[in-house]
Image (cartoon, rainbow, N blue to C red):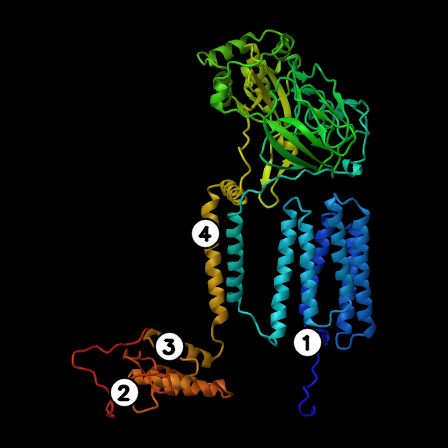
């Protein structure tokens, strides 16, 4: 003890806290907990490798080293070597130093490089830490670190494959937490019903929050500095020309050909010609993903010259634009200046031609090259082939008048005579098509009304299908479609509309590109597939320039919210289910539900004679409003039921039955079958419904007669008998 008058010496609080934090904890003996935690970490490694944050050799190496570290930790959990902590600490510091050097050596504007380096840091720490996880808290730290790795991977995700990986990680995480509780409780078991309720509540809360999320805002411009991301780069042989026109094996895409192996034209190569005589299928391959402020047609190029079978460009020359990103582009010919700005970022998935897609008129482009080419119609061409992994951003200008404004557009600038001849050119007089157009648009009075009338007629009198016969030699696409089978797809339908408009002297041209594609409510991206390639018509208005009209597709006015997109996709999925299959599906769900309930009841059934007696007695008590108290033995509870029924003197038939059941439960054998039946028969009469009172010990008791006489049945009154199986 300290001398009188001198305060006792105390260890500073911070030092004591450090000592407690570093005090050895009891080793974790649960193998299942280690396996569950390891599964979560391995899922995070695999997810990072699949997204490209780690290379597959790095991911597989991390998995192997982590498994070896966990095995070493299990073997040395009771007495970890002292040098292990030193090695783990040195490894963690080395990983931090490597991360700092890697970030400092790269461009600060390249956020992708930072995310990849951060993924490597998390993976290195998890691998190093795996060699020293003797206690449960160390395993929990590994789970938390894997959550950080999944969060970094989420920033790289651009499709729903990450959602599947996230479900696997969440499953492994829940398994880990369940095993942690089981280990901490000394082998306790969780209630399946409670687990189901808890998981269901979390899922419903998350779904509700997801459904009310607002539409994500798009405001960032992505400037890619790594030229190798463009897939090579592969130089285009003709400066300013389209990659599809070269026809060389080195090109990333080729024009379609009726004699080629795919027999698909126009869209795959986006060449200088659009041959409507070619038939083919484009498939469901993902071409690119687009993040945009608003969905639109992704324009690739336009065509002005029609020869009866194919479209081409009479002014294919493109002007060189230098200076690097951002490239400032001129306003296309025929379009007014200004308009609403719109930002789109294109992430290329499959190698494509050298067209730079955009919405409306491209005003500024952030692209991984030193130069670009642009045409008078607004077509933007890259000097290199665009391969998988390329990313570029376009700020477009959109002039979007209302239908009422277009309906009354009768003034403004006029096209020059040469441009007017260019956009009303026809290879020959289309007398039948012109007569049809005049009859459909008779009395409309404005260009907009005439366009809408023709679109309405096409929708009513033609059928969209990609399964159409080849165009006969020498036949005209428009005549064959309008006055033949009237079956075609976007090329035939849009071409027929453009020719009918030109026959009336209205400037029109063919535009090709992609429709927005399907919207992913999780990533906020539009997934554009090969079969989203499309052709439509652009009509010129004096005041508003070139405006898009589509007889076969429509573009939404705005990005949907995640909840609206999810509900829409769910509705489409349900709508795709054949109606005859719905009753069967509902019936199967009901049968499955009944089966699950029956299985649960079967699993909860008493397995012994004593358990069956207890269940029957408790059912009988609940039926008269007297449930069993937690502290009551079965015999005490049965005696209460005897008192409710007026059974005197004690012990009553239920108490005798309960006593036999307790003797059986605590080591004795059940009574002979005959005696068991007699006891059950004596206890089968239903207890009375007397008002209960609370005794001094807190147990519900009922008033009983003071005399020893048993209650007698009144003359003419029927005695209540219990239901079958009631005790």
Q: Residue at x 50, y 17 (%)?
A: 409
Q: How far apart are marks 3 and 2 (CA)?
A: 19 Å
**87 w.r.t. 250: above or below:** below
Give the quarter of the image for residue 537.
top right
First-in-chain label (1 vs 3): 1
First-in-chain label (4 vs 3): 4
SS assignment at label 1? helix
First-in-chain label (3 vs 2): 3
Q: Residue 13 has which mark?
A: 1
**106 w.r.t. 408: above or below:** below
Between 75 and 621, the residue placed more toward the observer is 75
Q: Distance between the residues labelled 2 and 1?
A: 66 Å
List the residue tagged with mark 3: 627
Q: Residue at x 67, y 20 (%)?
A: 377
Residue 604 spot, x, y in % from top left: 48, 71
Badge 4: few (under 14), some or many (20 or more) residues near its Cα, within 10 Å?
few
Between 364 and 25, the residue placed more toward the observer is 364
List the residue tagged with mark 4: 587
């Amino acid at each position: 003890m300290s001398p009188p008058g001198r305060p006792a010496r105390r260890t500073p609080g911070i030092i004591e806290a450090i000592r407690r934090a570093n005090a050895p904890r009891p080793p974790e003996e649960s193998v299942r907990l280690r396996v569950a935690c390891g599964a979560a970490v391995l899922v995070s490694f695999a997810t990072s490798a699949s997204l490209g944050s780690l290379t597959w050799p790095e991911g597989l190496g991390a998995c192997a080293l982590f498994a070896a570290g966990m095995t070493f930790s299990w073997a040395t959990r009771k007495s970890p070597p002292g040098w292990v902590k030193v090695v783990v600490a040195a490894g963690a510091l080395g990983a931090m130093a490597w991360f700092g050097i890697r970030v400092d050596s790269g461009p600060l504007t390249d956020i992708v490089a930072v995310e990849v380096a951060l993924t490597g840091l998390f993976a290195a720490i998890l691998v190093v830490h795996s060699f020293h996880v003797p206690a449960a808290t160390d395993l929990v730290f590994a789970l938390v670190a894997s959550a950080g790795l999944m969060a970094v991977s989420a920033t790289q995700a651009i499709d729903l494959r990450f959602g599947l990986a996230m479900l696997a990680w969440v499953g492994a995480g829940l398994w880990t937490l369940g095993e942690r509780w089981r280990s901490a409780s000394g082998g306790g078991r969780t209630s399946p019903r409670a687990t189901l309720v808890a998981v269901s509540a979390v899922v419903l809360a998350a779904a509700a929050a997801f459904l009310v999320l607002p539409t994500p805002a798009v405001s960032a411009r992505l400037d890619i500095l790594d030229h190798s991301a463009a897939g090579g780069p592969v130089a285009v042989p003709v400066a300013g020309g389209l990659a599809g026109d070269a026809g060389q094996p080195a090109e990333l895409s080729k024009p379609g050909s009726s004699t080629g192996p795919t027999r698909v034209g126009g869209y795959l190569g986006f060449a200088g010609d659009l041959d409507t005589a070619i038939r083919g299928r484009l498939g469901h391959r993902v071409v690119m993903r687009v993040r945009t402020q608003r969905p639109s047609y992704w324009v690739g190029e336009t065509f002005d010259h029609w020869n009866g079978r194919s479209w081409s460009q009479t002014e294919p020359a493109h002007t060189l634009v230098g200076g690097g990103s951002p490239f400032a582009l001129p306003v296309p010919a025929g379009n007014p200046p200004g308009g609403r700005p719109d930002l789109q970022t294109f992430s290329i998935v499959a190698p494509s031609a050298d067209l730079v897609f955009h919405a409306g008129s491209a005003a500024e482009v952030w692209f991984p090259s030193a130069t670009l080419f642009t045409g008078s119609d607004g077509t933007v061409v890259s000097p290199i082939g665009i391969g998988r992994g390329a990313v570029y951003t376009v700020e477009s200008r959109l002039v979007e008048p209302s239908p009422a404004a277009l309906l009354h557009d009768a003034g403004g600038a006029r096209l020059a005579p040469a441009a007017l001849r260019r956009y009303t050119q026809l290879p020959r007089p289309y007398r039948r098509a012109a007569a049809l157009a005049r009859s459909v648009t008779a009395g409309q009075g404005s260009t907009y009304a005439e366009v809408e009338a023709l679109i309405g007629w096409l929708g009513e009198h033609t059928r969209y299908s990609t399964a159409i016969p080849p165009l006969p030699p020498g036949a005209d696409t428009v005549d064959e479609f309008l006055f033949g089978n009237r079956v075609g797809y976007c090329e035939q339908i849009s071409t027929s509309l453009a020719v009918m408009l030109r026959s009336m002297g209205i400037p029109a041209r063919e535009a090709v590109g992609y429709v927005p594609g399907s919207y992913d409510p999780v990533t906020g991206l539009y997934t554009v597939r090969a079969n989203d390639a499309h052709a439509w018509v652009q009509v010129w208005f004096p005041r508003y320039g070139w405006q898009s009209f589509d007889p076969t597709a429509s573009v939404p006015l705005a990005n949907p919210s995640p909840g609206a997109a999810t509900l829409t996709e769910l509705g489409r999925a349900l709508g795709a289910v054949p109606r005859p299959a719905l009753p069967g599906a509902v019936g199967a769900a009901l049968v499955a539900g009944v089966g699950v309930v029956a299985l649960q009841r079967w699993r909860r059934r008493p397995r012994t004679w004593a358990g069956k007696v207890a269940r029957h007695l408790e059912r009988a008590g609940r039926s008269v409003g007297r449930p069993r108290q937690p502290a009551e033995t079965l015999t005490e509870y049965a005696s209460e039921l005897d008192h409710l029924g007026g059974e005197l003197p004690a012990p009553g038939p239920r108490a005798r039955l309960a006593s036999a059941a307790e003797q059986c439960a605590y080591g004795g054998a059940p009574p002979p079958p005959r005696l068991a039946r007699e006891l059950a028969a004596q206890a089968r009469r239903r207890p009375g419904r007397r008002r209960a009172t609370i005794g001094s010990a807190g147990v519900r008791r009922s008033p009983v007669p003071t005399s020893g006489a048993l209650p007698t049945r009144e003359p003419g009154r029927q005695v209540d008998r219990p239901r079958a199986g009631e005790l």
